[in-house]
Image (cartoon, coloured by chain):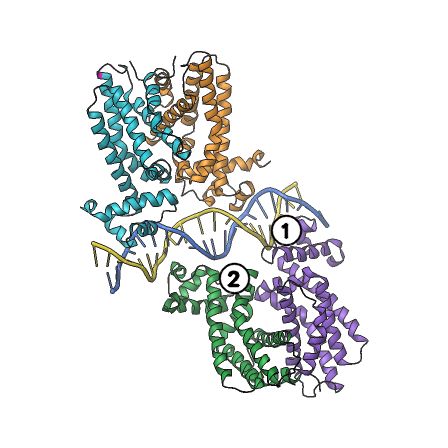
Chain colours: A purple, B green, C cyan, D orange, E yellow, F blue
Amino acid sequence: MKRNKPKYHQIIDAAVIAIAENGYHAAQVSKIAKRAGVADGTIYLYFKNKEDILISLFQEKMQNFVENLEKVVAGKQKAAEKLLLMLENHFTILSDDRHLAVVTQLELRQSNKELRLKINNVLKDYLKLIEKILSEGVESGEFKSDLNIRITRQMIFGTIDEIVTTWVMNDQKYDLVALAPTVSKLLMSGLSA
Amino acid sequence: MKRNKPKYHQIIDAAVIAIAENGYHAAQVSKIAKRAGVADGTIYLYFKNKEDILISLFQEKMQNFVENLEKVVAGKQKAAEKLLLMLENHFTILSDDRHLAVVTQLELRQSNKELRLKINNVLKDYLKLIEKILSEGVESGEFKSDLNIRITRQMIFGTIDEIVTTWVMNDQKYDLVALAPTVSKLLMSGLSA
Amino acid sequence: MKRNKPKYHQIIDAAVIAIAENGYHAAQVSKIAKRAGVADGTIYLYFKNKEDILISLFQEKMQNFVENLEKVVAGKQKAAEKLLLMLENHFTILSDDRHLAVVTQLELRQSNKELRLKINNVLKDYLKLIEKILSEGVESGEFKSDLNIRITRQMIFGTIDEIVTTWVMNDQKYDLVALAPTVSKLLMSGLSA
Amino acid sequence: MKRNKPKYHQIIDAAVIAIAENGYHAAQVSKIAKRAGVADGTIYLYFKNKEDILISLFQEKMQNFVENLEKVVAGKQKAAEKLLLMLENHFTILSDDRHLAVVTQLELRQSNKELRLKINNVLKDYLKLIEKILSEGVESGEFKSDLNIRITRQMIFGTIDEIVTTWVMNDQKYDLVALAPTVSKLLMSGLSA
DNA sequence: AATGAATGAGTATTCATTCAT
DNA sequence: CATGAATGAATACTCATTCAT
């Protein structure tokens, strides 16, 4: 299995940094190889092509993301609490890895439609987790009984994504994690007075 | 003034269709010119370069968007009503122009950081309009008095954007406009039972 | 006759300045037209094409050059004196028109082989004048009786050209005309002690 | 070191022929590559860009030129003899490589001012060699004691250049090398009877 | 005579991928 | 396993010239 060998991760980590520093289009395979300390050709022993590096990168990072999240929310009873933890967790991970934040929020979106569909596929586990929290909240009576799960999930994910992107575009210069309670309350009770 | 001449709009309309059909990167200048019924060189009498076509395209469409919206909400008293109208309006415009929807939600995002900053600049008027509706709602007592305007605006815009993108990614196969009341209620009163 | 109308000369003078200031390749027809105060299309009422402007320019200036020279040397008896006057005259004309010097010594040489052949054709009268002075000098016994006229003419013209070009390349920062006696003596009596 | 690899010279030799046959502007990189038997992209492993091919070409050939010349004149005592050998050598090299003659006398001059400055820089060693011969001749008493070295060098180089260019423009149809003694005598003792 | 909007041919360079060693 | 030299497809933009007004 390729992904257990050290060079696999060397290359993925090199890709994150190369993309964050140079931008999506300027991150040539040769630059990634150089930064990973391998020859250009070696990349192709571990990845099918350049796109495969990017998908693998996203998969690898997102897997940690979701696994981590599942553990965190597992111990909690209330759906509202789970939601807050999810927000905090999401914001924390990206706050802690500035390169990764730039890559996921800005650079990877420059990829073509096809690649973005594959990336969305990787996101599915995360989206399912959101929907699971929502369903549980409805069942427990915490959330509205007529909640449109799909639309609500889109609201939550869209809100998170826009907030993180704005933060990255503003050079990550304020405390993202500190926003979690505000966002959570807003999602829970809406604008209405 | 270039933008009052018919060819200016011919080229922009051709660009929308060419990009929607071929994708951002495959939409060569020569294809756009052919579809617009002009010579390649003529493009450069109206636009500085290829990037300028895209920015102008976005500007042109977004201007209509915001102007239209301002008229629509002008006659309304309640902030909640304005919010709903805004959603309906946004969804309707993109529902009515399938090509434009693909271009704004998917293709234009493949542009580089620099171009995206310019596009964001064009978006500012729209974001200001959202913030204006929110401020008025707070003042009139309709919305929570401690509403974080900036974060709330990010929630609203993020929600709209994610819902439209999901709809486009699903080949626009369901009725987007019909979702407006659901989304509006959700934003107004949140998840909480 | 086109060349008696004012716009003909306006365009030629505009071309000299445009080429001197922008360089041969950056001197677009539209720039020349603008500087001449006429429309692009008007150029083509007076000149067949761009190349024709350049040839006409060279012809026009060179004609003055040779006519002037013929008058100057006409009054002189000695071939040596004629040679010196020719040098002084050549250097003076180019010293007095810095733009023309740049155009003839540097910019016009960037033209293709074909155009350069036509320019050489225009030069023929000048070269004939040199040969005439040489022949007269041989006949009068001033110059060596076995002088190879053709080669000597090449030496004289090559020497003048190289000296002027070096002066232009050095930003015309020394007194070119002052060199004439030195050059004349050198051509007359050679290196040999 | 790139210039020790065979492809470096393959490409330079291909460039000389391609330029001589097609002219400077029509000598596309792809044509040079094809003639050199390499892919277009390979050119860029050995040269920074097209201009770099031309400068390297000139450098490479001129280096041989000067080195060769230095050896030839080293064994000689008299400055006059060195001058004659220099002429013969210069004429012989260009007579022996018709393509190179066309390229250096006609095609390379069509390059822009910037490139020509770089080419002039390469020429400096040759010009220094001429000046060295002149200085030695003055010191030994062979040449005039008040010789203006700089102007004399310009005369010699201008003469050589004009004679070679005329020969190339006349399709190299007479014996260039045979002219060397005539030119040498002319430079040595001038026109004067 | 004069205009100037429109035309459209032409080319250097990059970089993901391969494959002989 | 690893290398890295070699490959070659793909595209925006300029500007001399035309011609309807």
Hey, what amino acid is under mark 2? His
Residue pointed to by mark 2: B25
User: Label 2: chain?
Assistant: B
The circle on residue A31 is 1
At numbered mark 1, what does the secondary structure look like: helix, strand or loop? helix
Left or right placement of residue B83 versus residue B18 in this view: right
Q: Horizontal and vertical percent for residue A84?
A: 74, 75
Q: Position of residue D132 (x, y in %)?
A: 48, 20
Quadrant holding the C terminus of chain D: top left
Above or below, B57 relative to B83: above
Q: Which residue occupies the foreground of this view, A174 or D110?
A: A174
Position of residue B155 in the picture relative to residue C91 (left or right): right
Tell which of E18 and B170 is nearer to you: B170
Mark 2 closeness class: few <14, some 14–19, many ≥20 residues within 10 Å: few
Give the total number of marks visible in the rendering.
2
Compute the Cα span from label 1 to label 2: 22 Å
Residues rendered magenta in the picture: C139-143
Q: Is residue A153 magenta?
A: no
Kindly give the residue lying farthest to the front in the view shown. Answer: B139
Magenta-drawn stretch, dominant element (helix, strand or loop):
loop
Q: Nearer the viewer, residue C169 or D69?
A: C169
Can you see residue D1? yes
Badges 1 and 2: C-beta atoms under 8 Å apart?
no
Vertical order, A27 against B160 (above or below): above
